């Protein structure tokens, strides 16, 4: 599908970026994506006519926050982030990355550990944002267990129950886990994390450097990103070796992974339903 003219016009009127050519880029799950050739070189553009008004603004802020952390990770420069107008859908324009099939995974791991060394006073963020297309609440909390329960798990459980995908047993299951959270989860300083770190959300550039895209950033537990990375695989042993060369994992991490991954699992329940429901129910009943 061709890039809507309303978008190229807005890019030209508001940013003096003129587009010669646009080519669809496949592989996204939510938005329509294009490589555009412009007077400023090749850029990556995505738009979504159904996205909430602040969707691409929040994504751009997330990218900028990651870029502001001093790490070896590459974060695409944000060129434009626009809410929908009467004329055009909302869209985001960022630097185009010439991606390579592989890169330096060990350096990626070490650089992610470096990102996690960026800390804040509290868990959360000054703005809510999105995980995939779902809202993500970032209200500040002083302790990780209450942030994880109140801002991550409970809103997703409520959504799943309200839509009839899960029932009240899910809440009882969560209450049992939640009463043990302080013992289960090790303490940490609130650390800047990507927040949606599955293998579709990183690329390697032609220097073999990892590039992070599609963030759902907040200050949280670094183990969230690592658990997320295990949800669908796609991260090599070198990646974890690189991470641990900077920040060794605390004992018992593997046992905590299913607890952290209840969050992306419930997000998948709410986005797709299907077999994710029984998977989530099974984790929720494990602690009964
Ligand atoms: P969605 O937000 O719908 O999940 P993405 O933006 O993640 O879509 O990605 C769509 C496709 O574009 C994926 O194949 C991804 O690898 C690629 N991609 C994402 N960002 C860039 C970029 N800055 N440069 C080049 N390709 C990109």
Image (cartoon, helix red, strand yellow):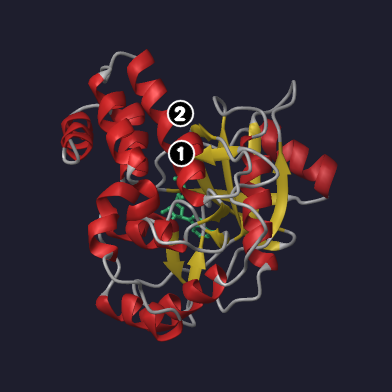
Label 2 residue SS: helix
Instruction: Find residue 258 and report its horizontal and vertical position in percent.
Output: 25, 50
Q: Is residue 5 visible?
A: yes
**12 in relation to 122, above or below:** above
Left or right, residue 206 beside residue 85: left
Q: CA distance from mark 1 to mark 2?
A: 6 Å
Label 1: element kind: helix
Whether label 2 lies within 8 Å of ligand 1 gets the answer: no
Q: Which mark is residue 152?
A: 1
Above or below residue 136? Residue 88 is: above
For disc 1, the neighbor class at 10 Å (few under 14, some 14 to 19, many from 20) is many
Residue 135 x %, y %: 53, 32
Q: Quadrant of residue 108?
A: bottom left
Give the numbered dot on residue 155.
Answer: 2
Give the residue displayed 48% in from the left and 74% down from the top: 113
Q: Are marks 1 and 2 in contact (CB under 8 Å)?
A: yes
């Amino acid at each position: 599908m061709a890039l809507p003219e309303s978008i190229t016009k807005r890019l030209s009127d508001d940013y003096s970026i003129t587009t010669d050519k646009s080519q669809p880029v496949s592989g996204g799950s939510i938005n329509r994506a294009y490589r555009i050739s412009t007077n400023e070189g090749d850029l990556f553009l995505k738009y979504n006519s159904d996205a909430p008004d602040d969707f691409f603004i929040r994504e751009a802020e997330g990218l900028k926050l990651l870029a502001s952390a001093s790490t070896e990770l590459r974060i695409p420069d944000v060129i434009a982030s626009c809410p929908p107008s009467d004329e055009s859908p909302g869209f985001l324009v960022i630097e185009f990355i010439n991606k390579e099939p592989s890169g330096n995974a060990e350096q990626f791991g070490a650089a992610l550990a470096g990102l996690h060394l960026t800390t804040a006073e509290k868990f959360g963020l000054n703005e809510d944002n999105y995980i995939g297309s779902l809202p993500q609440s970032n209200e500040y909390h002083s302790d990780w267990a209450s942030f994880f329960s109140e801002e991550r798990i409970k809103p997703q459980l409520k959504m799943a129950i309200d839509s009839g995908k899960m029932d009240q047993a899910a809440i009882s299951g969560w209450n049992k886990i939640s009463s043990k959270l302080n013992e289960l989860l090790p303490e940490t300083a609130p650390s800047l994390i990507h927040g949606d770190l599955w293998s579709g959300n990183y690329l390697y550039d032609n220097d073999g450097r990892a590039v992070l895209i599609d963030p759902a950033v907040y200050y949280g537990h670094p183990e969230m990103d690592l658990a997320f990375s295990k949800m669908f695989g796609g991260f090599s042993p070198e990646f974890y070796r690189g991470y641990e060369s900077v920040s060794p994992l605390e004992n018992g991490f593997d046992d905590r992974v299913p607890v952290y991954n209840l969050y992306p699992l419930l997000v998948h329940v709410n986005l797709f339903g299907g077999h994710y429901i029984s998977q989530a129910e099974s984790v929720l009943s494990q602690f009964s």
